[in-house]
Amino acid sequence: MLTSEISNRLRRALSALAACCVALVAATTVVTAAQPVGAAPLAHQISSDKYSLTIDGKRTFVWSGEFHPFRLPSPSEWLDVLEKMKAEGYNAVSLYFDWAYHSAAPGVYDFTGVRNMDEVLDMAAKLGLYVIARPGPYINAEVTGGGYPGWLTTQAGKARTSAADYLAAADQWLNGIDQILRRHQLTNGTGTVILYQLENELSNTGSSEQAYMQHIAGTVRADGITVPLFSNDKGRNGFWVPSSSTVPGTVTGPTDLYAFDGYPGGTCHTDGTPGGPAAAPDWGLYGPGGAKGGASASPQTPGYAAEFGGGWFDYWGSVGTYACMAVREGPGYEREFYDTNIANGLTLQNFYMTFGGTSWGWLPAPVVYTSYDYGAAISESRQLRPKASTMKELGYFLRSVTPVSEMDKGSVVTPSAANIKVYHNVNPENGTALYVAMHNPSNTTTDDSFSFPIDTPDGSYTVPLTINGQDAKRLVANYDMDSQHLVYSTSEIMTHIARADGDLALLHGRSGETGQTVLRYRSQPTVAVLSGAATSTWDANTGDLLLSYTHSGLTQVRISGGGRRPLTLLLADDATADTFWQQDTAAGPVLVRGPELVRTATVAHSMLRLTGDTSTGDGLEIWAPASTKVVTWNGIPVPTEPTPAGSLAARHDLPAPAPVTLPVLTDWKYSAESPEANPSFVDSTWAVADRANTNSTTKPPAGQPVLTADDYGFHTGDVWYRGHYTVTGTAADTISLTYGGGGAGMLQVWLDGADLGQNVLPTGLSSPPTTGTATFTIPQELRTAGGHEISVMVRDDSHNEDGGVNDAQKEGRGLISVATSAAGAPLDEGIVWRIQGNQGGEQITDPVRGALNNGGLYGERSGWSLPNYPDANWASATLPASTAAIPGTSWYRTTFTLDVPRPDDASLGLTIGDPSVPRSAANYRALIFVNGWNMGQYIANVGPQHTFVVPNGVLNPHGRNTIAIAVTSDGGAGNGLEPVSLTNLGTVRGGVPVAMDDSPGYQPPAIRLTGRA
C-alpha cells in the first residue's frame, strides 16, 4: 500500500470521527412516529441538519419532480408518469392536492375515481418514490381559485388569515386530505410521504397570517401528520423559517424546514423563439447570505428549492411558448442551473413542472388556457423530451455519488480563462471533491477551452476542460467509487455499480470532446479496450492510471489487477449515455442499454423480468446480477448471449410499435341550442337572483340585487340570466352590463329574442383583465311600453388566484351589475333576474367526472355532451362549417371506433383548425367533450392551442368513442366549426395497462344521477 494512500485513509477516518462528534451537538430536526403495538409496518426516522435530510441514518439528496394527478384524469396513466419519473432518475415526486377538485359544496368531499389520492400515493410507494405532499389549503398552481372551491368565495372572512369561518373551512379540508396522507407517511412505515407543505407562497406575515399558520400546523399535527413541515417562500424573503434560524430579518413559522422557490431561467421571444439565457443564481453556499439569500435564511437546515423552474406556463392569446420553453430550459439550462444549485448545497430540489398535464374542464385559472404542458421534461402527451434525459444524468449521478449530499465550500479555484468560474466543494467526512465549471457570467454562450488546478490528497493536477455555449461540467475527484479510487475525471459520472464479477461505472461527456480519467492503484493494472478507442498511461511513482479518450459512441475498457477488483468502464457521449437505464432489484442493480424506456426490473431465481417501451427496433444489452440466465421483455423471452464487457446482449432487436391508423372523423350531427334566448323559454324553475348582500369583492351598486353566480351556487363555466322588466315610461336606449368572465371570458345578450351582440375580455396578456363592462344599444323597435325579456349568457373562465392574499378569488363571476339609460339619463327598469348555471349547482349530477367538468349550457344540462345521447334526430353536418347559423351555441356530435394495436401505447389528441396558422380569423370558441369529459376550450381567434390531448382511459383506444363540441359565437360567416381530426402525438410499444373510466353516459331524466349527499 502506498504511503500516501495510508495517510489519506487515516485523514478520512479522523475527519469522519470529528464529523460524528460535531453531529452530536449540531442542531437537528427529527420527526418520527411511534410504532403502534402489534403493527407490522416499521416506523422510519426522518431527520435533518444543515446539509441534507437523513432517512434512517442515511443522507438523502432529494431530487423531485412536480406532478399534479388532477391534471391527468386517468388514474392508469398516473402510473405511466410515475414510472417515467423514476426511470429518469427522480427519487421523489411533489404532489399538489386541489381542494376545489374534491369539494363541490361545503362538507362534501370525494376521494374516489379520478380523485382517489390513495391510489396515486400507493403507486409512488410501490415504485419507491418519496412523496412531498402539498395540500394547501391554498396551492396557486394556475388552477381556478388557486385551489379554493367555488363555495369558499361566499365566505365573509378573509382567506389565508385567522378569520374564524376560513379556519373552519380549512380544517374541514385538511381533516379530509390528512386522513389519506397520514396513511401514507414514511414515518409510519405505511408509505413514502416524507415532507408536508403547510402553505404555499404566503407572502403576508402579519399577526393574522401568523395565527393562521400556527393554527393549520396544529391541525395537521392533530390529524396525525408526523413528517417534517415546511412552507414555500414566494421567492427568497426569509419567511416562515424554523425556530432554529436566528438570521436577522427572517420571520419564524411553525416549520421544520425552510423552503423557497425561483424561476430564473430566461424567456422566449414574442414570436415563440428562445430568448437569451439568464444567469444561474447562487442561492446557497456561494450566495449573498442573510435573510434574502435563499438557503442562508435557515443555516441549520438543508437548502431546499421547493419549486425551481422546469419550464413556465402560457396564457390566452400568446404565440404558444411551450415548445420554446422545452428548448429554452432544455439540457444546457438544466446542467447550468441545476448544477449551480448542487454546488450551492441545495440538497432538496423540486422541479416545477416535470409533467404539466392538462387543465381540463374548468380547472385552469384565468392566466392559462387548457394545456399546462409547461415545456416540462415529460410533455403533456406523456412523451419524454431530451431534457428528461439530462435529468436522468443528474439524478443517477446524485443517487450514486452520495458524498454530494454533504458538502462544504472548498478552496478557491482559479481557471486559466477569465470568463470561466469553477465551484469547489469538499465532503467534510471523506474528502470527496466536487468541481462545477461554467462560464462567468454563466449566461455567456461562447465556446471555450481552459484548464484549472486541483489540489487533492492524491496530489496536484491540472485539469483540461471545454465549455461550449450554455453548459456546465460536474467533475468529481478523490472519490472512493465502490472498490476503486477515482483521482479525478473530466467525464461526468452517471452511475457506478458494485457487481459480483467486479465494478461497473458509466461516465459520459459531450460528443467529440476529449476526456481524461485517472484511477489510483497499488501496482500496474492490466488495461483492455473492449470497444472504441482509449489509451492508458501508468505512473509508477504515484500509482496513477491515466485513461485518455474521445467521447464518441461507447468506449468500453476493462481494468484488472493493481490490487483492486476488476472495473469495467463505460465511456459514452451524452446521447449514448442517455440510452442507459438503471433499475434496482432485490438481487442488486441492473443496468440496461437500448430501449426507449425501462420501467421496471424484477429478479426471480435466474429470471430477469424487464418492462418498458420501444419506439423503433431498439437493441437490448443488460448488466444483470450474476444469477441471471433468462431475460424477458414485457413478458416475452429474449434470447441473449454474453459479451466481453460482462453484459448480456439480445440476439435480435426488440419489436417496434405497430402502425396506428386513425379514423377520419365524419358523420357529424348538428343541433342549435341557446333556447334561453327565446322569449317563450320557461325559466320559472330557475333561482330568483334577489339577494341583498354578498361577500364578493365586486359588489353591485346600492339598490341593485346581487347577481354574482357564486352567491347562487354556480361556480364553473357558462351561466345564464333571464331578466324580466316592464317599460311604463321612457324606455332605455342602452344597457350596460358589468360582468366577471375570468381569462378570455365573454358575454352574450339578447332582448326579446333579438341578438344585441357579445363582448369578449381582452387577451394576449400574461395577466389578463377578468372583468369588464359592455354597453349595447337597444333597437328602437324594442323600446316599447310593456313587458320585455333580456337573456344574458356569461362564460366564466374561472376564478382568480389569491396569490396576493387579497381575496382575489372573490371577484364576481357572471353578472355583477346592470345599468340602463335614455339620452344619457340613467333609468331603473326594475329588472327581475333569474339565474341558471351548471346543472344542480353545488349538488352536482355527475359525481364521476366531478364539479369542474361542466358549466351551464343548455346542452350540458340536457346531457348532449354525454356518450349515448340519442342524437338520431339531429341534422347531419359536414366540417368545416362555413358559417355559424345563429348567435349563441350550437353542438356537433360524432362517434368513431379506435383500433390501436394492443401492444402499443398511442397518445392521441384532437386537433381543430390548422395548427400552422397562429390564429384563425374565425371568431368562435368551442368546448370539447370526449366521452363526456370536458377536455378543454378552443378559441379560434385567440389561441394559441389547436390540439387537445385526450388521455387513454378517457379515450378508449380499443373501441367506440363519442365527441361532442359546443361551438359558441355571435353567428355569421366564417364563424363555423373548422376541421376536426385525430392526431397521433407519439406511439411506443409498451405503456401501462389502462382501465377505462366508469363514467355514465346519457341517461333519461327520470333516472339521471343526482348529487352526492
Image: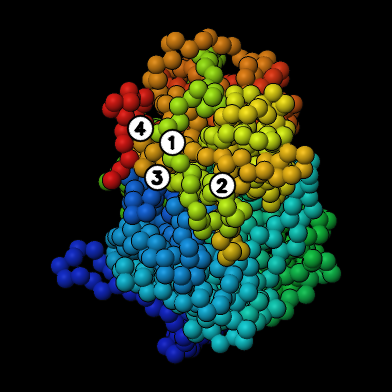
Tell me where residue 806 sits by quadrant.
Answer: bottom right
Horizontal arrangement in the rendering, residue 53 relative to residue 572 (left or right): left
| Image coords of residue 92 (percent x, y) | 46, 58
The residue at the point 69 percent across, 23 percent down is: 781
Q: Is residue 169 above or below residue 361?
A: below
Looking at marks 4 and 2 on the same chain, the residue that comes earlier in the sequence is marked by 2
Q: CA distance from mark 4 to mark 2?
A: 29 Å
Q: Confirm or deny contact between disc 3 and disc 1 (CB under 8 A).
A: no
Assign a secondary structure to mark 1.
loop
Residues packed near mark 3 inside 10 Å, few (<14), some (14 to 19) or many (20 plus): many
> What residue would you read off at disc 4?
999
Of mark 4 and mark 1, the one earlier in the sequence is 1
> N-terminal of the two: label 3 or label 1?
1
**Sequence order check, earlier mark of 3 and 4:** 3
Residue denoted by label 1? 686
User: Of all residues shown, which one is farthest toward the front?
Assistant: 729
SS at badge 4: loop
Write down the residue under mark 3: 842
The residue where tag 2 is placed is 813
Camera-side mark, 1 or 2: 1
